[in-house]
Image (cartoon, grey):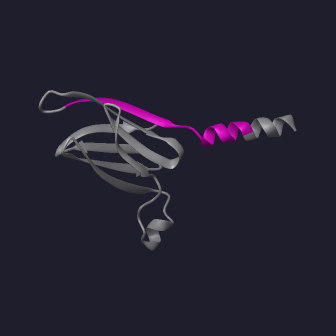
Amino acid sequence: MKFSILSLSILLLIGCTNFTAKQPYRTINGEQMLISADMPNGYLKIRFNEEIVINESTLNQDKSISGVFSNQYTNVYTSKYRGEKVMARCHFPEKECDVFLGSDYAANLVLR
């Protein structure tokens, strides 16, 4: 009985794990920022200097028949930060995101 409770507790903690990543970035204007990401409870949150820029589900967005049943997929998220377009291209299940600010490649975040 104790073993099963311990096992269940460990599985619960693993399921609630929050994957995080951080990377510094300097804009063309010289502004320094910290780009960070985490994935609490199946949602991707990307922050620029602690300001949430993207807050979207990590579920597969491909609605095609083959895409629905695929375990490997790429989601593209878009948003704005101080008037600049932000795009994140995230590969799952690798949990890796390429982040762009305007037309510049800003970060590669690997969420572990």
Does the rendering let one see residue 73?
A: yes
Relative vertical location of residue 112 with respect to residue 65 in this rendering, above or below: above
Side of 89 relative to 20 (left or right):
left
Q: In the image, residue 44 lies at what x, y percent?
A: 43, 46
Relative vertical location of residue 23 with respect to residue 93 in this rendering, above or below: above
In percent of the image, x 16 and y 46: which residue is there?
103
In percent of the image, x 47 and y 56: which residue is there?
59
Q: Quadrant of residue 49?
A: top left
Does the rendering let one see residue 95?
A: no
Relative vertical location of residue 55 with respect to residue 10 in this rendering, above or below: below
Q: In the image, residue 21 lies at what x, y percent?
A: 41, 33
Name the residue at the bottom extreme.
65
Q: In the image, residue 72 lies at what x, y percent?
A: 45, 56
In percent of the image, x 36 and y 41: which residue is there?
46
In percent of the image, x 68 and y 41: which residue is there?
11
Q: Quadrant of residue 96?
A: top left
Name the residue at the right extreme.
1
Say which of 75 and 52 sits in front.
Answer: 52
Query: Does the magenta portion include 14?
Result: yes
User: What segment is highlighted magenta in the picture?
Assistant: 9-26
Side of 39 relative to 17 (left or right):
left
Relative vertical location of residue 34 with respect to residue 81 in this rendering, above or below: above
Which quadrant is the N terminus positioned in? top right
Say which of 16 and 7 sits in front.
Answer: 16
